[in-house]
Image (tube, rainbow, N blue to C red):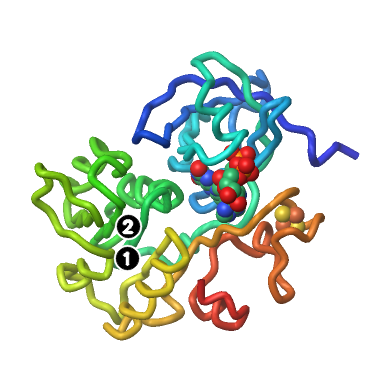
Amino acid sequence: MPNEYLPQKAVVESIIKETLDTKTFTLRLVDKFERRLRYKPGQFLMLSLPGYGEAPFTFASCPKKDGRFEISVRRVGSLTEALHNLKERDIVGVRGPYGNWFPLDKLKKKDILFIAGGCGIAPLRSLIQYVLKNKRDYGKIEVIYGCRSPKDIFYKEEMKAWEQSKNSAVHLTVDEPDAAWGGACGVVCVLLPKIKVNPKTTMVFLCGPSVMVKFAIRDIVKLGFKEQNIYASLERYMKCGIGKCGHCYVKGKYVCTDGPNFSYAQMKKLGIES
Ligand SMILES: Cc1cc2nc3c(=O)[nH]c(=O)nc-3n(C[C@H](O)[C@H](O)[C@H](O)COP(=O)(O)OP(=O)(O)OC[C@H]3O[C@@H](n4cnc5c(N)ncnc54)[C@H](O)[C@@H]3O)c2cc1C
Ligand code: FES
């Protein structure tokens, strides 16, 4: 039987510095025969570096034919520090894809609202790229993104293209504006009055700090968005990523295999309203 914990080799093709503490890596499998990780937006992989360990990271780009995929890594500890020291052509270990994906079938013809805080934009970016690539299948796309300061905003250039796409809008807010900032200030909820989607039929995807997710859900439910149309990506401590070690277990569910994406109705049942 193949060893489920054995990583495949992936090469670092390019590195972009997004913010002071976050870099985006473009990776590609080294294997000559299996060049693609067949994942869907919302899934994650386990990424490892010998001597530093292994951790889960979400796919931050939509699946591409050439097999390249991106992950955005925030430097918080020893593994992520070591990843930040990598150079182009270095090799990392990857295994996956793991976890469930966003409910792509439920989205067809619908308006979609994305609400992200900080590095929570990474998993949503995978879905945003996916729907923008297949735009004729979807309705209006609105993105609300909140960060600590203008310096902490990811994917700045790409967001300009999201805004220029037909029927889509991006709304930004920061907690600590600088002198050049002319946009909104405060938590993501301050931007809700700006959105122009129909709450009754719009699908909502959230990812960010748990307090942000909790208050944003409270406010959108008040605006009439339906609980079964609201999904959040959850982060829990993970070790194996494949439902074996129990690290991510919550009330009968493993976040690594049953999640990390849950509808609000499911979150309430699990008592994890974020
Ligand atoms: C499904 C999933 C997807 C993720 N996707 C991304 C991603 O796309 N980009 C990214 O930068 N990070 C992501 N993370 C978090 C990432 O796995 C951790 O930051 C990583 O394990 C840190 O490793 P380290 O050795 O650098 O830090 P450590 O030394 O292990 O930890 C440093 C600090 O981060 C905290 N921490 C570590 N893991 C978690 C966690 N899972 N939840 C909350 N706090 C944690 C620790 O408590 C400690 O305070 C994801 C986590 C999960 C569960
Ligand atoms: S991380 Fe091991 S069971 Fe989920």
Total count of labels: 2
Q: Which mark is on residue 62?
A: none
On screen, residue 114 above or below 64: below
Image disc number at residue 109: 1
Q: Name the secondary structure under disc 1.
A: loop
Task: Give amino acid for label 1.
Answer: Lys
The residue at the point 67 percent across, 57 percent down is 256
For badge 2, the amino acid type reads Asp
Q: Are marks 2 and 1 in contact (CB under 8 Å)?
A: yes
Image-based side of 196 in relation to 126, left or right:
left
Relative to 247, 141 lies left or right: left
Q: Which image quarter holds the N terminus? A: top right
Give the SS element for disc 2: helix
Residue 48 position, x and y percent, is 67, 32
Image position of 108 with respect to 25: above or below = below
- Residue toward you, 107 or 54: 54
Residue 231: image location, x then y, percent: 46, 68
Q: Are there few (<14), some (14-19), or many (20+) residues within 10 Å of tag 2?
A: few
Q: Which residue is mark 2?
A: 137
Q: CA distance from mark 2 to mark 1?
A: 5 Å
Would you say 145 lies left or right of 178 here?
right
Q: Earlier in the sequence, mark 2 or mark 1?
A: 1
